[in-house]
Amino acid sequence: MTNRKNWGYFLPYGLWLVLFVIAPVALIVYQSFFNLDHQLPLNNYATYFQSGVYLKMTANSIWYALLITLFTGIISYPTAYVLHQLKHRQFWLLLVILPTWINILLKAYAFIGIFSQAGMANNFLRFIGIGPHQLLFTNASFIFVATYIQIPFMILPIYNALDDLNPAYVNASLDLGATRWQTFRRVIFPLTLPGVKAGVQAVFIPSLSLFMLTRLIGGNKVITLGTAIEEHFLTTMNWGMGSTIGVILILAMIIVMQLTNDHDQPGGFPR
Amino acid sequence: MKRLLTIVALLLGVCGLLAYTSHTLTTSSGSTGAKVLNLYNWGDYIDPQLLTKFQKETGYHVNVETFDSNEAMFTKLKQGGTHYDLTVPSDYMVSKLKQAHLLQPIDRSRLTGLTNYDPMFLNKSYDPGNTYSLPYFWGTLGIIYNDRFVKPGSLTHWSQLWSPKYRDQIMLIDSARDILGMALAEQGHSMNTTNPATLRAATHKLNALSPNVKAVVADEIKMYMIQDEAAVAVDWSGEAAEMLSHNRHLHYVVPSEGSNLWIDNLVIPKSAQHYTAIYAFLNFMSRPDNAAQNAEYIGYATPNRRAKALLPKTLRNDRQFYPTRQTTRHLQIYRDLSPNVVQTYNDRYLEFKMHH
């Protein structure tokens, strides 16, 4: 009876899993075996790994995703740390989460307004006398906007990890003669590492396949795998190749998950 | 157990709701009632007043649904479950739809306005004898420039875009066919070439343009050009018309050595049901007064020569949008290329975009 009961409770989640996770992934993998001429399976993969363009694009995507993750981390950890010590921290945390309620497209358009020749940023540069600069369509602006968009997804897990940290450890470390820096390096940081890892997972993977931003902010001067997938599905109608890149992204995701996986109690993954 | 039942019931409820939504969604893709016409059109591509006028005259209510790319429209028609009576593909898409057996021939005996059309836009390679299509609007690919940064009249040829004086000044429309086509036209090749070596040469030519390219963007080009963000852009005449109406410093030019001529057409998909309404609409739209009104509203060039004669002189004689015969002679219509060639175009284009 207990077994049946457990199985029954699994039903809703199981259905969800099959319909919205397993079936779509299976379809993508299935599609990826067909190229335009319905030739040999794995043909798309051969094309992918023999094409300098795709490999360079993959390298590009990984490089930009790394940079975005790195900058997000550099900004998020201290922010989460400070937030955690504030008095009305739930309120400040809310302010961090608030931008995620706004559609990414709207945020991108807002940045177009800020970075354009007649925009706020250039007006400021003119005011302090270093003239207007080309800000839009540069790698720097792309990374800036992507980082801005990803920051909340890094702050939250780190914040939760800090929340889980027992203050007694910190006090003990300080009492036993460790300096503030030693306490941070030897106690706080290692204990909140699961949060950082969760943040990396939440930021790195979506960054690999950003595509709207590459056009709107990067002016297609930054090309990532997302651009290629969009093109294969919408322009060339080569769904096979698009799916192949999708599968490769899934594999990349698994690798990142493995690298950042923590077998201990994770720091929490609130979303 | 009770809670389990609740969960299952809830799940079934959600499934039922989804099924219902999906059902209403598919049925709303074209109503099947009697006095209607289901038009599947590009966004904002017909004067809404004409639809009111059509309903007043004939009693048919026009349901308009929109798409934003030929490919999206093709996919939707192919998947079925739609009841569109008319749709508006571009030239190459007409032949693609034809090949996929998604179109019905037009019964010419029921048309009354065929003689109004300029023969230049009839009997084209994509649909010989106009068995399946009637031209709706036409246009070109060309260069838009801002006379605050570029001397008026000084920019008339593709090759000038490669000049170092336009460094980081040019915006390109994000379209493989058009941008590679531009490089091909600059080199004096056909914009429909399938020769890999020619395409490779065009890609090299494009790569050399990279330092001048400020960005490769889509619809946003209009906004940027209107806001003086860039000096030069390569875009379609229809988009140019809209930019020009918002910024009087902008000018449009079709390079005389060759460019693309595109024609959007009215066609009847296989799924059509309301034939009386369809022919009433086709005849209504080919009437010179209506076609002229539509052309004035949309700002694109009309293939209806009697409608063109009704347009205000400034519009009719605008060489930007109704280029001289000399230029028109060198315009090329995109042919529907095989999927593999389309793939090659896109791969080469991607290569160009990745080039810095």
Image (cartoon, grey):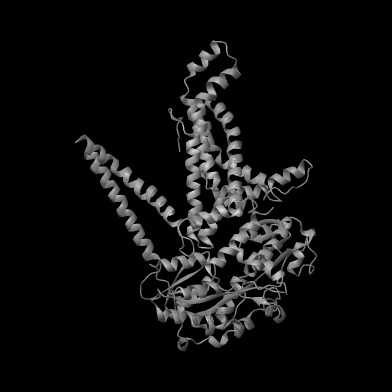
Which residue lies at the image location 52% right of the left edge and 24% below the top edge?
Answer: A190
Which residue lies at the image location 37% right of the left edge and 51% below the top edge?
Answer: A23
Q: Residue at the far top: name it.
A: A176
The quadrant of the picture occupied by the N terminus of chain B is top left
Name the spot of residue B214 as percent of width and height, x first. 70, 55
In this rendering, is residue B124 above or below B215? below
Quadrant in the picture for residue B157: bottom right
Nearest the eye: B65 or A175:
A175
Name the spot of residue A140 as percent of width and height, x first. 67, 44
Name the spot of residue A157 as percent of width and height, x first. 49, 33
Q: Is residue A208 left or right of residue B37?
A: right
Asked if residue B228 shows in the view, the reply is: no
Quadrant in the picture for residue B79: bottom left
Name the spot of residue B211 as percent of width and height, x first. 73, 55
Q: Is residue A33 left or right of residue A18?
A: right
- Count of labels in the image: 0
Nearest the eye: A39 or B156:
A39
In this rendering, is residue B276 above or below B157? below
Nearest the eye: B313 or B89:
B89
Asked if residue A101 shows in the view, the reply is: yes
